Amino acid sequence: MRDARFILPGVRAALDGKAPADHSHSLDDVTGLSTALNGKAPTTHTHALADLPVADPGESNPTKLVRADDPRLSAGSGAGALAAQRNLVVNGCARVSHRPAAALAATWQPGEVDLWQVRADGSPSAGTVKRATGVFSLSPSGSAGLIQGATLSSGGAIHWRLRLEAADALRLRHSPAVLSARAYHDCGQTIGWTLTLSRAGSPDSFTSVSTIATTTISVPHDSNTNLVLAVPDMGACETGLQITITATCGAVSSRWFYLGAIQLEAGDTATALDLRPIALETALVHR
């Protein structure tokens, strides 16, 4: 090793400004570190229930949790149950999804959105039944049912179907109600979207259904459009309800169809989508 006396000029000064290889720092040596750590919780800590964002009974807030004993999780027409909430459609928000995407077919089948079923007329040769996310311009939930890349021949149409149990439909018996949704398509021309409400032939049996009301709305190409069906009297609907929404498009190739914000509510005026906490919506799907 060379004698330190022969180190090149300037190297000694540079080495004198360096810390030893083995050294340490206190918290105060690092600018701002103590302040940052003071705002952190200890590694080992607990939370009280009051510390968590929990929804009050009847509160609809998508950012809050739902207690296991929340009365809204109960079926039937009791206070606080689904039948007492504004939107009687479970997962009309399209946020709950536990299934994979499916190929568009001529028979009813589930897709990515839980509780929704889809089929197509016009000998479907292409298309995927999916769930779209991030579509807040279409639905306040940001989610919607999506038929991606549908190819249909003459007589083509896309059908969505949802059902309500008898216990939930009872609230609307002989009362006014409004079915609403939001739709979008890229078919290149205006097409008709038809909303139909039907009642089950017997309690919770949909082998046969009877139409209560139906209407068709013209939906332009590339336009988010409101769909509304107002029914002055739902009649004897306590056996259960079936919602069918149909986009009659004719022959199309590689076209996209979106449907979201499906809501059925008592009254004669459609209101904004009742966006329930996701924990509550998921529990209602699996009740």
Image (cartoon, grey):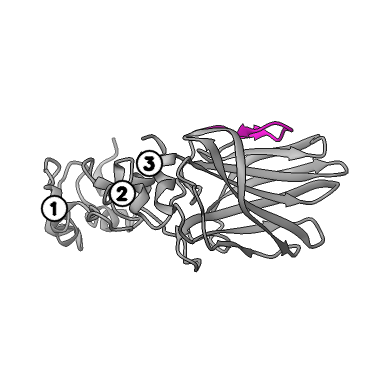
In the image shown, does 98 or 251 lie closer to the viewer? Answer: 251
Q: Which residue is mark 3?
A: 284
Could you tell me how far apart the alpha carbons at marks 2 and 1 are, in whole angstroms? 67 Å
Residue, far right: 154
Q: Which residue is mark 1?
A: 50
User: Would you say residue 163 sits in the magenta stretch?
Assistant: no
Earlier residue among tags 3 and 1 = 1
The residue range painted magenta reads: 99-110
In the image shown, does 237 or 16 lie closer to the viewer? Answer: 237
| Residue 102 picture quarter | top right
Q: Where's residue 255, x and y in %?
A: 77, 49
The amino acid type found where label 3 is placed reads Leu
User: Would you say residue 106 sits in the magenta stretch?
Assistant: yes
Earlier residue among tags 2 and 3 = 2
The amino acid type found where label 2 is placed reads Ile
The amino acid type found where label 1 is placed reads Ala
What kind of secondary structure does the magenta stretch mostly adopt? loop
SS class, disc 1: helix
Using a 10 Å C-alpha cutoff, classify the residue at mark 3 as few (fewer than 14 neighbours), some (14 to 19) or many (20 or more): some
Q: Where's residue 205, x and y in %?
A: 52, 32
Using a 10 Å C-alpha cutoff, classify the residue at mark 1 as few (fewer than 14 neighbours), some (14 to 19) or many (20 or more): few
- Check residue 7 in the rendering and tell me which mark sits there, or answer none: 2
Could you tell me how far apart the alpha carbons at marks 2 and 3 are, in whole angstroms? 79 Å
Could you tell me how far apart the alpha carbons at marks 3 and 1 are, in whole angstroms? 24 Å
| Residue 287 picture quarter | top left
The N terminus, quarter of image: top left
Relative to residue 25, is residue 285 depicted above or below? above
